[in-house]
Image: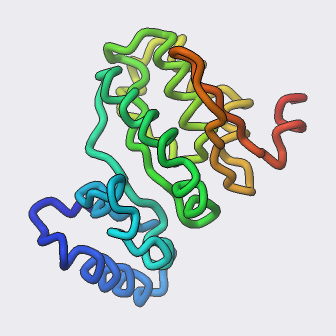
Amino acid sequence: MDAANSPKDKMPRGFAEFAQNLNDTGRSILFSCGYPAYIDWQNDYSAIDWEALKRNCNMWRLTSDLDDDWERIRTVINLYAENGEQLRAINGPGHWNDLDVLALGNFALSRDQERVQMGLWCMFSVPLMLSTDLTSINSESAALIKNKILIGINQDQSGNQAKFLGRKGSVMVSVNKCLLCASVVKT
C-alpha cells in the first residue's frame, strides 16, 4: 500500500491499523507498506520504528519507484551498501526490504545491467517482482529470471541479506550467508 499524500506523522499508525484490519479477516494476506520510502530514514535511522514496521508489514519500500534507468538502480544498490548493517537487521522470513521491481526484459537495461540487478536482488533476499510483458520477453532475460541458482539464493529459508564487504573502484563486493547455497549450486 502506497503512502502518497498521507501526512508523515500519521503514516506509521495508519499502516498499523490497516495491518490489524487485514489480520482481523483471518486470511493470510501479504502486506506491503510504502510509507518508509517517504521518510528520510537514511539521515535519521530513528525516524522509523523498525520493530513496529516488522510487526505490521511483510515487506516495505525504502526508496522511490524504479524503472529501467540504470542510474536510479545504481542509487538503490548504493543505498543498500551504505545502510546494509541496519537493513540486514530487519530483513528476514516474513519481513522483507523491498528494492522495487526488476526492470528486466523489454527495457533499456543492457544484458550486464540486467544480470547485476537480478544477482543483487537475489543476494539481498528481497521480493522478486517483474515489471515486464512476459509474453514478449527476450530469451536472455527469460533465462535470467528462471535461473535456479539465483532463485535458490533469493528463496533461501534463512532470509539472510547480503553483507557489503567493500568497494574497489566501480566493483562492489558482497557476500550472502545462504544456508542452502551449497546444495543449490550443485543442482
Residue 123 in the image: x percent, y percent? 63, 38
Q: Quadrant of the C terminus?
A: top right
Q: Return the x and y of residue 118 as percentages of the image width and height.
A: 54, 28
Q: Residue at x 18, y 70 (%)?
A: 8
Q: Looking at the image, which residue is at 45% across and 61% down?
A: 59
Q: Is residue 22 above or below residue 69?
A: below
Q: Residue at x 54, y 64 (%)?
A: 95
- Up the image or down, 13 lies above or below 61; here it is below
**Viewer-closest of 152 and 13:** 13
Most extreme residue toward the bottom is: 24
- Using residue 78 as the reference point, say whether residue 39 is left or right of it: left
Q: Nearer the viewer, residue 146 or 17?
A: 17
Identify the residue at image location x=40%, y=63%: 45
> Looking at the figure, which quarter contains the N terminus?
bottom left
Image position, residue 101 (x, y; %): 39, 38
Q: In the image, is residue 34 above or below residue 183?
A: below
Counting from the top left corner in percent of width and height, residue 62 is at: 36, 52
**Camera-nearest residue between 173 and 186:** 173
Q: Quadrant of residue 159?
A: bottom right
